[in-house]
Amino acid sequence: MWRERDIYGETDDGAVRLGGGAAQWRLHTDHVDVAGGAGGRRVRIDAELLPVVLDLDASALVLLDLQNDFCSPGGWTDRSGLDHTACRAAVPGAVRAVRAARELDVPVIWVYWHNRPDLRNLGASTLWSFKHRLDQAGIGQPLDHGPVLTEGSWGATLVDELRELARPEDVRIEKYRMNGFHATHLDQVLRAQGIRTLFFGGVNTDQCVSTTMEDAYFRDYAAVLLTDATATSSPDYCRDAVVFNSQQCWGFTTDTARLAAAR
């Protein structure tokens, strides 16, 4: 029999309950507690719209698509006439995020494009996303360093600064769409490990990062965008819209300095 859930009811510490059971959040005047009443390693992190109290034992860092084809000269973004240096702006923050996660003993999850050489995992709409002109190389087509975003290729490899920080025990999720949850085992891994809070970084802010963060929100994770660990080659208003929605709808925003300072 279901127990009655007093959603929006006042808790014993003067907060308002959001949700019920072990998954409930508690909204206080000056912070939001997303730890769900767990003991764990509770810390407070400054964030927008409010500071967040969370359980580090139930948290993970998710970094998306910090690959050569997006962030390096000679990669797909560069060869398509887009600004790869704008994507590369996420790399220093991602390095800081990984180092902070290591210090906090928070797992790191690498999510990245890893397409089949025969492209049988891709539909026409996804292929169109990467090929808007007849003379533009699409996924799987050759560039100077090999096929675009293809399994085993230079373009699909993490940029050097992050490849040096990756560890064998890190979780690696191969994806085939912008959304890191779609047709992958990301959700299963997170739930099996009891992860409830996700910190997001990577590229592109308004595409793979935003769709994955939005899906995390749909799946009831506490989602936190690390604003200085994400970047995009799109116009500034695209990033601004993601930051706005991350604060107002999908979860919270913070930065790597505040993550590192979590206590």
Image: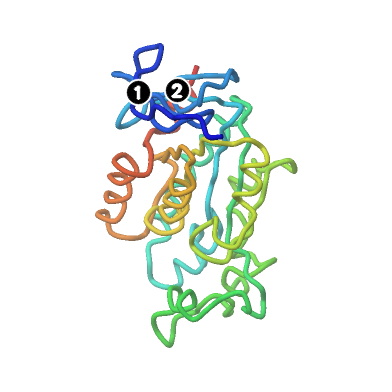
Count of numbered labels shown in the rendering: 2
Q: Is residue 129 above or below residue 245?
A: below
Choose between 99 and 221: the one closer to the eye. Answer: 221
Describe the element under mark 1 as helix, strand or loop.
Answer: loop
Instruction: Find residue 33 and report its horizontal and vertical position in percent.
Output: 43, 24
| Residue at 54% in and 75% down | 139
- What colour scheme has been applied to the protein in the rendered image? rainbow
Labels 2, 1: front one:
1
Could you tell which of marks 2 and 1 lies nearer the N-terminus?
Answer: 1
Describe the element under mark 2 as helix, strand or loop.
Answer: strand
Q: Is residue 234 above or below residue 24?
A: below
Say left or right for 143 vs 261.
right
Instruction: Find residue 241 and report its horizontal and vertical position in percent.
Output: 27, 51
Residue topped by disc 1? 9
Instruction: Find residue 40 and report its horizontal and vertical position in percent.
Output: 60, 20
Choose between 69 and 100: the one closer to the eye. Answer: 100
Say left or right for 4 vs 196.
left
Residue topped by disc 2? 53
- Which amino acid type is shown beneath numbered disc 2? Val
Instruction: Find residue 175 and report its horizontal and vertical position in percent.
Output: 59, 61
Say left or right for 18 vs 59.
left
Residue furthest right as drawn: 168
| Residue at 51% in and 59% down | 72
- Which amino acid type is shown beneath numbered disc 1? Gly
Q: Is residue 203 above or below residue 69?
A: above
